[in-house]
């Protein structure tokens, strides 16, 4: 199977369109240019929004929920059939180890399957009211949805946001990140093949300028944004100007809390993998490990041993850790590592072999005894850097865990059932995992943040509510 989409083009109304401005796409494993993308300007964005609006009114509104479900199922099947092509595109473009890119393809297909199944299960309510009234609610799509996504998990984020928006009857304009947009374009090509009407999904590639133009457009009805806090603030300001709802999926500083009675052998792979997966460039990366003082030396030594075995190499070498996405990201992460020079560095990973190219590699770093107010304990690094901190008791653990501006994901490792319950309630976090971390990705599980991690929920059935609005109909019939 192949997915065909032309180089240097984006997708408006089912047509591949280009502009005069091009951006180079870089393979992070080598630093080489692998393709170019066209930058959509204000006019293109305006066209895409106009098309999405017309298609909504004239075509998509007439398509039943069951038909949307069938289209999403077909799309899911096409994604599975193109598993190898999509995985190698994502691995090359993002620099992630091939196995991790393969898992992302599976997740994208699963999102389509999940939202295909959910499309015709969403309905309103009838509400008991005054005599001679019948009151019911209609769940309606917002209309034209903008999806602005980052480079770290393009396929997964397309799956959770565009999947749910299409299932609920919205038309979409997708703006992928300039560093990694190949699988977004491939996804666009597959929607055509699956039989989605032209104009239901439009894609505009380009830099932040394209994203700004899209988010400021007065005919957008909803924005789903995944990315950094600073851009999220700008997006929310644009949404405020047009008084439209916005979902913000921002960063995190997610803790794993290890109590003295935890099954440490069971915890160990989660403690490390959740920090170094995708080279730590994961919004839900677990960058803080909080360990109760009784087992602190033991956990430090277990994690250090694990770190020393971590191998770094190219996406296609398919090792534990690939390169960072870009030179810029490499500078940001290196700067944080530099800020840790006053801390104790207990272990790093290693290169499988000497790398003699322009790839953006960074060894995983494990720091210990990090004070709670240190920049490495407070800021999202978005690289393979983890810190370990010790705590005395439950109250102390909660204080440290809730002591950053973020609140995306947390996990608790203990065999004490009461403690598990108490901690789940006390943590300021969009998701809490007990004796695991991430629950295998969980397409079904509502996901989103608190505080600086954002607001609104995607994934699971909950996203179906986020991409719709309620209309209350009060019928007086005497
Ligand atoms: P970013 O710079 O905020 O970019 C995200 C998207 O917004 C990209 O498509 C970007 O375009 C676009 N953009 C940039 N400036 C814009 C503007 N002024 N108006 C509208 N759109 C604009 O984030 P990133 O560097 O790609 O991703 C890293 C950050 O995202 C991290 O902080 C991470 O935690 C967060 N993240 C969160 C989640 C989550 O689910 N919570 C998931 C992934 C990442 P260009 O790329 O073309 O500049
Ligand atoms: Mg790239």
Image (tube, rainbow, N blue to C red):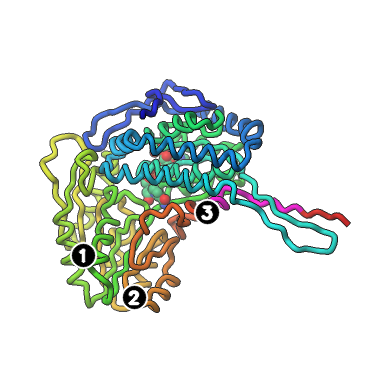
The residue under label 1 is: 368
- Secondary structure category for the residue under label 1: strand
Q: Give the answer, above or below, for where 224 lies relative to 427.
A: above
- Which mark is nearer the camera, 3 or 2? 3
Horizontally, residue 32 falls left or right of residue 352, namely right
Give yes or no for contact between labels 3 and 2 (Cβ–Cβ under 8 Å): no
- Secondary structure category for the residue under label 3: loop
Give the Cα separation between the discs numbered 1 and 2.
17 Å
Q: Quadrant of ligand 1?
A: top left
The residue under label 2 is: 396
The residue under label 3 is: 461
Q: Give the answer, above or below, for where 74 lies relative to 337.
A: above
Q: Percent x, y for residue 378?
A: 33, 60
Q: Percent x, y for residue 319?
A: 20, 46
Give the Cα separation between the discs numbered 1 and 3.
39 Å
Extent of the magenta region: 463-473
Callout 1: few (<14), some (14-19), or many (20+) C-alpha neighbours within 10 Å? some
Give yes or no for contact between labels 1 and 2 (Cβ–Cβ under 8 Å): no
Query: Quick one: quadrant of the C terminus?
Result: bottom right
């Amino acid at each position: 199977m192949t997915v065909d989409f032309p180089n240097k083009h984006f997708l408006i109304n089912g047509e591949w369109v280009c502009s005069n401005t091009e951006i180079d796409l870089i393979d992070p494993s080598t630093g080489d240019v692998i393709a170019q993308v066209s930058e959509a300007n204000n006019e293109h964005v305006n066209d895409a929004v106009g098309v999405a609006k017309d298609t909504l009114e004239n075509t998509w509104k007439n398509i039943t929920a069951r038909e949307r479900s069938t289209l999403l199922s077909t799309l899911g099947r096409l994604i599975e059939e193109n598993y190898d092509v999509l995985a190698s595109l994502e691995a090359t473009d993002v620099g992630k180890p091939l196995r991790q890119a393969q898992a992302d393809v599976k997740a994208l297909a699963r999102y389509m399957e999940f939202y295909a199944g959910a499309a015709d299960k969403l309905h309103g309510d009838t509400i008991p009211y005054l005599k001679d009234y019948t009151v019911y609610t209609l769940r309606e799509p917002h209309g034209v949805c903008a999806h602005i996504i980052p480079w770290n998990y393009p396929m997964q984020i397309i799956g959770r946001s565009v999947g749910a928006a299409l299932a609920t009857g919205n038309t979409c304009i997708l703006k992928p990140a300039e560093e990694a947009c190949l699988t977004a374009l491939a996804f666009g090509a597959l929607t055509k093949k699956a039989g989605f009407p032209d104009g239901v999904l439009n894609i505009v590639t380009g830099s932040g300028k394209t994203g700004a133009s899209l988010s400021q457009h007065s005919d957008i009805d909803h924005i789903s944004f995944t990315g950094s806090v600073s851009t999220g603030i700008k997006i929310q300001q644009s949404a405020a100007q047009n008084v439209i709802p916005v979902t913000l999926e921002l960063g995190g500083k997610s803790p794993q809390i290890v109590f003295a009675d935890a099954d440490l052998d069971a915890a160990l792979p989660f403690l490390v993998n959740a920090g170094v997966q995708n080279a730590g460039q994961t919004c839900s990366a677990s960058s803080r490990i909080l360990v109760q003082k009784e087992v602190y030396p033991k956990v430090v030594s277990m994690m250090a041993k694990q770190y020393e075995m971590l191998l770094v190499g190219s996406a296609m070498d398919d090792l534990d850790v690939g390169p960072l996405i870009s030179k810029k990201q490499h500078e940001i992460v290196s700067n944080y590592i530099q800020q840790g020079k006053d801390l104790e560095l207990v272990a790093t990973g290693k290169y499988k072999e000497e790398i003699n190219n322009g790839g953006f590699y960074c060894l995983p770093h494990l720091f210990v005894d990090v004070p709670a107010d240190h920049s490495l304990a407070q800021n999202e690094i978005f690289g393979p850097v983890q810190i370990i901190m010790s705590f005395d008791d439950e109250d102390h653990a909660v204080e440290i865990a809730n002591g950053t501006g973020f609140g995306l994901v947390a996990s608790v490792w203990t065999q004490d059932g009461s403690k598990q319950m108490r901690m789940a309630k006390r943590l300021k976090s969009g998701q809490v995992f007990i004796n695991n971390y991430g629950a295998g990705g969980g397409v079904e599980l509502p996901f989103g943040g608190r505080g600086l991690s954002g607001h609104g929920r995607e994934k699971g059935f909950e996203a179906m509510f986020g991409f719709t609005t309620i209309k209350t109909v009060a019928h007086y019939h005497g």
